[in-house]
């Protein structure tokens, strides 16, 4: 017996030892996680690293020695996760899983988070049931996990490391033990049962746990999809047991899921099994009741409650009905498929529904679709009496009659209709019927045209028949007319008046008696125009269609408001804004020669007076120079046409008879000021060149007003400059050339005369000598005379060519004289006739030829011999 008992004990111990190894699933990681049947999750971001004490260490010396699983946070990005899975636990038992862990970095910060997850039946992992994030140091810490498993469910514990920000650090676990007895520091939950409630009710889960110091633990209800629900209340059952309640308010089918209880502390965590929340939908009929019969005071229906939405079983059926126009509701319990509703009102609409109830609180479902029907009623007795016209206006007629009761209508629901018809202005018939409030003693027929005969009659109807009254004819009153059509208003503006045209309103609504037009200025280009005056009013007879408004200000926008009138008064106004044309500025007249101030050979100074704006401010002042051509007809000063096209001096060389010498902003002429024409300056892009002394000019002064697309100009001739006969400084090139040519001709004549005298003298001297000498002298004299004649002819030809060249040069100087600066007028002509043509005044190797020199003396040429 003792031997048998000993063998049995040894065999039982051996079986327990083998079972403990299979069920516990512990691992020291000496030979790696695979030896313990641990698996790396194939769907995570990276794998845990096995550190073996048998291999040469390659990690930091700050880490503990030995064999364990580790995650190096510096090798991975923030948010990446590594998971290692323990073997599946299937037995119906209480387990305690304890393990060592550490989280280490060199700077004491957190390398990441160590999460513990429990997956049931290969479902979702839900949220962690325990986690740690803070720095733990280099020493191992120990925690435990209380897991209650219930067959046939499968439970799997997962260790997850999540890297925070990639700092140099480590997350490690070691010495995992799966024990088949309760934990010492973490409470264990008893089996959590399913909860069934009707939709819309509150559901309560109650979790009961055993353990020490459980009151200080954190508690929550964890949903399988990851949602965490806080604890509602806790209650201590005894010193070793407590209960936690969790409430879900007004649950629906969306809340139906698996839930479990979780408790957590610094020493570890506990988790219960998953329990289901079952939400039942109270029953509701799919189809409305069916009407089987109807009478004046009853309705016969069939419940039609075999097809339902929601869950059964059905323990009660009810019929709910009410008047559609009332607020009361009655409910009758029904034990048969058909039901008859008694004591109903005639000709009344009812709404009938069916209610179904299942077991449990809140088991009565919503009422099914309604059956809307009406009880029968009789034909009306007669139409209302005492029908009269209470009020007549231009666009409506009010009708009174006696109050309609059930004794007349024989129905609680009936309709009162007023039908009317009339002929419009085009002799076309328009008819309509209006539904009235049958309980009101007065009804109004609106939207009628004024001054029109309208025919009225009343109709009383119910579902069983109708009654009509006799027709009554009434004429509507006149009304104020409609607005004058804005598209018909046309206006023609002038400088000081506006011509306005309009047409009669499209809706006169009676006889037009007059038109009233009010107008006033609302804005003006001229700031001096008063705008704050009250509007002027013009009253015109009914047959007027146009009017001229005089004494208006130029450049001013006037607002015209026109309205028509009947005996009822004025209609709505129509507004039109019209702007008068601007006027040319007014230039002040000059007394005599007031405008002329000074004159030189190349300039003329005039007096400029500021202009007065009319309708628009002055935008610019312009000085125009007109060259007088003797072949061109001169314009009278009183009928001067202003120069609209701005032509510069350079452009005037192409044939324009005038050019703009200056353009001045209005601010440059606040008061009368002198201005010099020909001062060789530029004003606003226009060059004011010196005037040609030998030309005649007219000087004009223009004032310009310009706004938007309208420009007006006023001009005045200020002065006329004549040609200078004897220039003070600059001699006329043409006269200078003529004088030089004349002097050259006289000099040539004198030279010829001297030559003749010399020849005569030589002949007299030779006549006293011998024949031979005389012949030679005569021959020499003949040759010398011929020579000097040829020389004189050459000089005469040279002088003629010189005169022709000087004539061309003078003409060119006269044409371009206007381009010269005034400084040229101050320099006297210092170049001699001979110097300008490189002419030698002495023949080479001929001492007999007298010398002629042209010497400049104060601008005059003198020949010296």
Image (tube, grey):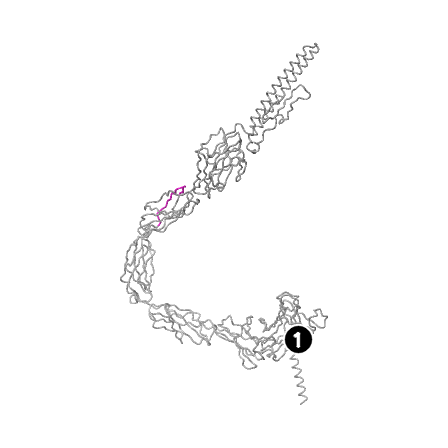
Q: How far from the left and from the top, in percent, is residue 541?
A: 32, 46
Furthest-left residue in view? 386
Q: How far from the left and from the top, in percent, is residue 381?
A: 28, 65
Q: Is residue 371 above or below residue 524?
A: below
Q: How far from the left and from the top, in percent, is residue 62?
A: 69, 70
Magenta region includes residue 121: no
Instruction: State which quadrant residue 334 falls in.
Output: bottom left
- The image quadrant where one finds the C terminus is top right
Q: Is residue 723 left or right of residue 375?
A: right
> Does the image show residue 154?
no
Q: Is residue 396 above or below residue 588?
A: below
Q: Which residue is at the front of the view, 114 or 634?
A: 634
- The image quadrant where one finds the N terminus is bottom right
Furthest-front residue in view? 858
Residue drawn 50% across the image and 41% down it: 668
- Specify start and end residues of the magenta stretch as a single range: 492-506
Q: Is residue 392 left or right of residue 160?
A: left
Element carrying mark 1: strand
- For label 1, the residue is 175
Q: Residues within 10 Å of mark 1 (few under 14, many from 20)?
A: some
Furthest-right residue in view? 56
Q: How far from the left and from the top, in percent, is residue 653?
A: 53, 33
Q: Which residue is at the front of the view, 800 or 324?
A: 800
């Amino acid at each position: 017996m003792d031997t048998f008992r000993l063998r049995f004990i040894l065999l039982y111990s051996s079986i327990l030892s083998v079972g403990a190894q299979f069920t516990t699933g512990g691992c020291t990681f000496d030979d790696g996680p695979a030896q313990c049947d641990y698996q790396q999750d194939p769907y995570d971001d990276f794998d845990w690293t096995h550190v073996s004490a048998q291999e040469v260490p390659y990690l930091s010396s700050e880490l503990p020695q030995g064999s364990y699983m580790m995650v190096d946070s510096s090798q991975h990005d923030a948010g990446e996760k590594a998971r290692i899975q323990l073997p599946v636990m299937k037995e119906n038992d209480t387990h305690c899983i304890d393990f060592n862990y550490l989280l280490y970095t060199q700077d004491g910060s957190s390398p990441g988070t160590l999460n513990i997850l429990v997956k049931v039946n290969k479902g979702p992992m839900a949220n962690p049931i325990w986690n740690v994030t803070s720095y733990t140091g280099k020493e191992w810490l120990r925690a435990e996990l209380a897991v209650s498993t219930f067959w046939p469910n499968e439970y799997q514990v997962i260790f997850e490391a999540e890297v925070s920000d990639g700092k140099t650090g480590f997350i490690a676990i070691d010495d995992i033990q799966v024990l088949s007895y309760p934990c010492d520091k973490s409470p264990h939950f008893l089996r959590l049962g399913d909860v069934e409630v009707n939709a819309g009710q509150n559901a309560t889960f109650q979790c009961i746990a055993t353990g020490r110091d459980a009151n200080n633990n954190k508690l929550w209800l964890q949903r399988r999809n990851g949602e965490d629900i806080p604890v509602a209340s806790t209650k201590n059952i005894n010193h070793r047991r407590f209960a936690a309640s969790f409430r879900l308010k007004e649950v629906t089918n969306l809340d139906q899921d698996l839930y479990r209880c979780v408790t957590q502390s610094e020493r570890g965590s506990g988790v219960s099994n998953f329990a289901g929340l079952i939400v039942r939908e109270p029953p509701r009929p799919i189809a409305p009741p069916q009407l089987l019969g109807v009478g004046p005071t009853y309705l016969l229906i069939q419940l039609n409650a075999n097809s339902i939405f929601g869950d059964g079983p059905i323990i009660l059926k009810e019929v709910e009905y009410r008047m559609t126009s009332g607020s009361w509701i009655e409910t009758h319990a029904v034990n048969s498929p058909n039901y008859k509703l008694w004591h109903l009102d005639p000709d009344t609409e009812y709404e009938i529904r069916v209610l179904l109830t299942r077991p449990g609180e809140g088991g009565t479902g919503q009422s099914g679709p309604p059956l809307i029907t009406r009880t029968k009623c009789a034909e009306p007795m007669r139409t209302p009496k005492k029908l009269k016209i209470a009020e007549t206006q231009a666009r409506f007629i009010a009708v009174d009659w006696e109050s309609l009761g059930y004794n007349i209508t024989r129905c609680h629901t009936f309709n009162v209709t007023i039908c009317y018809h009339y002929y419009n202005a085009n002799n076309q018939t328009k008819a309509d019927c209006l539904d009235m409030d049958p309980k009101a003693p007065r009804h109004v027929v609106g939207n009628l045209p004024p001054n029109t005969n309208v025919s009225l009659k009343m109709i009383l109807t119910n579902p069983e028949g109708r009654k009509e009254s006799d027709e009554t004819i009434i004429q509507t009153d006149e009304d104020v007319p409609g607005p004058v059509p804005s598209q018909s208003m046309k206006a023609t503006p002038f400088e000081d008046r506006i011509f306005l045209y309009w047409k009669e309103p499209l809706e006169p609504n009676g006889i037009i008696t007059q038109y009233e037009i009010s107008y006033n200025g609302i804005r003006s280009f001229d700031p001096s125009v008063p705008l704050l005056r009250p509007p002027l009013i013009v009253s015109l007879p009914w047959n007027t269609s146009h009017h001229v408004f005089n004494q208006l200000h130029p450049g001013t926008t006037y607002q015209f408001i026109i309205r028509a009138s009947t005996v009822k008064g004025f209609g709505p106004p129509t507004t039109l804004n019209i702007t008068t044309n601007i006027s040319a500025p007014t230039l002040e007249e000059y007394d005599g020669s007031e405008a002329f101030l000074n004159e030189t050979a190349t300039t003329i100074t005039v007096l400029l007076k500021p202009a007065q704006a009319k309708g628009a401010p002055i935008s610019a002042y312009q000085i125009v120079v007109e060259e007088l051509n003797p072949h061109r007809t001169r314009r009278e000063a009183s009928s001067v046409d202003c120069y609209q096209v701005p032509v510069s001096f350079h452009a005037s060389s192409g044939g324009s008879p005038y050019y703009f010498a200056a353009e001045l902003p209005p601010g440059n002429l606040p008061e009368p000021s002198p201005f010099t024409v020909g001062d060789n300056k530029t004003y606003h892009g226009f060059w004011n060149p010196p005037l040609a002394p030998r030309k005649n000019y007219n000087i004009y002064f223009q004032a310009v007003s310009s706004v938007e697309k309208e420009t007006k100009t006023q001009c005045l001739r200020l002065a006329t400059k004549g040609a200078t006969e004897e220039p003070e400084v600059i001699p006329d090139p043409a006269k200078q050339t003529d004088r030089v040519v004349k002097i050259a001709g006289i000099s040539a004549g004198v030279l010829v005369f001297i030559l003749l005298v010399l020849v005569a003298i030589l002949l007299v001297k030779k006549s006293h000598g011998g024949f031979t000498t005389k012949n030679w002298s005569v021959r020499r004299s003949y040759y010398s005379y011929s020579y000097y004649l040829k020389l004189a002819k050459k000089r005469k030809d040279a002088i003629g060519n010189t005169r022709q060249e000087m004539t061309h040069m003078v003409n060119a100087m006269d044409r371009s004289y206007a381009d010269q600066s005034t400084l040229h007028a101050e320099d006297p002509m210092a170049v001699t006739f001979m110097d300008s043509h490189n002419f030698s005044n002495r023949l080479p190797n001929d001492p007999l030829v007298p010398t002629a020199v042209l010497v400049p003396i104060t601008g005059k040429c003198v020949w010296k011999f």
